[in-house]
Amino acid sequence: MRFILYLFFGFISFVTIAGNEKIERFSNIKKEQPYVDFLTGKVAVFLDANFKKVEGKVVYTFKILQAIDSITIDAQNMQIMDVLLDGEKTEINYDTKKIKVARDFTENSEHTVEIQYIAAPKKALYFLKDYQGEDQIWTQGQGKYTSNWLPSFDDMNEKVEFDLVIHYDSDYEVIANGKLLNSQAVNDSIKRWEYDMKYPMSSYLLALAIGKYEKVVETSESGIPLEMYYYPADKDKFESTYKHSKQLFDFLEKEIGYAFPWQNYKQIPVKDFLYAGMENTGTTIFSDAFVVDPIGFNDRNYINVNAHELAHQWFGDLITETEGKHHWLQEGFATYYALLAEREIFGDDYFQYKLYESAEQLTEQSKAENATALLDPKASSLTFYQGGAWALHALKDMIGDANFKATIREYLEKHQFGNVTTSDFITIAEKVSGQDLSDYQKIWLEAMVFPSKEALDILTKTPFIKRYLTLASERTQPIAGKWGTLATALDFPINEYLGQEVIYQLEGDTSKESLALFTKAFETNNIFVRQTIANTMNTIPGELKKQYESLLKDESYATIEPALYHLWANFPADRAKYLEQTKDIIGFHDKNVRILWLVLALSTQEYEKGKHQEFYKELSGYSSPIHHFSTRQNAFTYLESLQAFSDQSLVDLVDGAVHHNWRFRNFCRKVLDNLLKNPTIQKKYVDLKVHLSKRQQDFLEKKLTP
């Protein structure tokens, strides 16, 4: 599936989009190029999965705000084929990072620049194989820079109205920002998709995803098309994956008080994504680890990520931070509005407990030497996300709900499609509320220490948190002195947070009083209270064996996994029974239950001894790149503990050590370093090198060289 470059450019043409609304440009933003404003970007690309390359052309229109002698466009390690300025070929200076076009540009003049290029991106655009061995391609611009696959702008203050034309194999779905205007065959195998955006956005929010997908389209109360994509093999998981999606959308649009700013909203799951999700303009790409069945929904659902990335469509996409110092304006806002949306589904106790939980984490973080203020560009994710959410919650508590909503609405209306600072937000909040917020800024935005007392004062306005803290205060008391309080907390109707607190306080206690409370906890039939028992009761008293065995029937993979292991470890005589009972359970996307089951089956000599080779083959096979990296990580973890790497799993480990997902890559490298301490493994890898790609061989060679 490869075209000669000149043929490719021959069939690319750009669609003129009529009716684009004029967007006000803001001049108070510190841009890298303050004297030029790039207005539109017409992009056409051909993606080659075989060679992992992009061949493309982009035409930018731009206006000169003040006379300058050059413009620059970011382009990382590309082959620049041709550059035309106002339709004429022009010389450029290109240092593999920036394209510089020199010209005496006069004030208020408008121009076009056309760039034809080839890119083989090492990041920001990823070429994979899905679980059926089909192509899958997706982008991740934030933190990686779209300029790795498209000449564009790393400066998030440069906002451009992009339109995309994408050419790819007609057997695939091609999804990108904006409204699909047209899709048509170019020839027998290639199809062309044309996407239109109406409004400007930062380059890092440009996105595309290609793969084997089907979709369901719903319509919001305000008339926005909601496109939800899924793999054909996951049709039965669609409802549980996207549960409450329309409800979340409708709630956030009303709560924020500003109409959804884009033409439509798409959500696409992809394999081996770098994060939980990414809020590309109108197009959220998210990890397919959140594709769950009805049981998986109970433990690891997509709702929080769904709401968080959706909230970013306003806070991050419609308005964008000017620099890292103001990152909380994106992540803190998205975290808080996601929590508000979750409250609609899970209730106020959930909302209050999550705030309490994050306050505890932030308080603990404040004790660290590297603690930072919310306005520090080097602040931790916990600070930007949870600390930012708390800053908003405190502001709402201070100025009142009506003033808070009015502030948000005016903030978005004034700065729509522009870039913002914390000062922009605070100025509007002071104007709307009529309050001086200087003390608020010092306490919640500028202080390095999280204001735990102020947070507690806000939390304890709710009866639930008061009750929870009263129960938590019993942690240091002996069981005899608090038995009645703990028993009352388990009364019907059970509050799951109070119930879990009871179990934490009983951990390791096997007295008769505690056994009675455990029995009562089992009988609540609350999935999360029972899950806490499964996770904390390592030694199972004989008196509770029957109740503990019932955990294997809970609709919770997060319960079944620890319950199976603890039962297997505590009652050797019944191991075969437990394995037989759970032999058909797979678990989450990472196959947590199945992989544990295989390890336990291999460790149980009397169980299906004739199938042990088959079990090992399955376990070892989960290290293959055809699986999600979380599945592979589970497999590698157990293979290392069993010291049972096959030749193929050793090859797979090196593949993981150069994987694009840095968390998985680092995990594999640690395992590999441990294995290479063994001279036998070193010798084996010398023989296995022929089975590795050039990149993998180069990496391994460095590891093997003293």
Image (tube, rainbow, N blue to C red):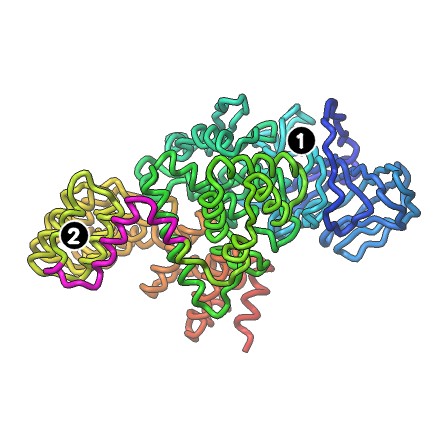
Is residue 442 found inside the magenta-colored segment of the image? no
Quarter of the image for the N terminus: give it. Answer: top right
Q: Amino acid at mark 2?
A: Leu
Q: Secondary structure at mark 1?
A: loop
Left or right of residue 50, residue 31 in this image: right
Left or right of residue 428, residue 272 in this image: left
- Which callout, 1 or 2, points at the residue further toward the start of the chain? 1
Q: Which mark is residue 243?
A: none
Most prominent secondary structure in the magenta stretch?
A: helix
Q: Nearer the viewer, mark 1 or mark 2?
A: 2
Pick the front one: 346 or 115: 346
Residue named by callout 2? 486
Q: Looking at the picture, how far across and down is residue 412, in whole percent?
A: 60, 37
Quadrant in the rendering for residue 705: bottom right
Residue named by callout 1? 197
Q: Looking at the picture, how far across and down is residue 119, in whole percent?
A: 71, 48
| Label 1 with label 2: CB-CB less than 8 Å | no
Count of numbered badges drawn on the protein: 2
Vertical placement of residue 46 versus 654, above or below: above
Left or right of residue 504, residue 694 in this image: right
Pick the front one: 50 or 479: 479
Estimate the spatial distance between the alpha carbons at disc 1 and disc 2, rounded to whole Å.
57 Å
Q: Looking at the picture, how far across and down is residue 382, in whole percent?
A: 47, 55
Q: Amino acid at mark 1?
A: Met
Quadrant in the rendering for residue 505: bottom left
Q: What segment carries the magenta color?
A: 455-481
Q: Residue at x 28, y 45 (%)?
A: 464
Q: Secondary structure at mark 2?
A: helix
Answer whether residue 69 is visible to the viewer in this image. yes
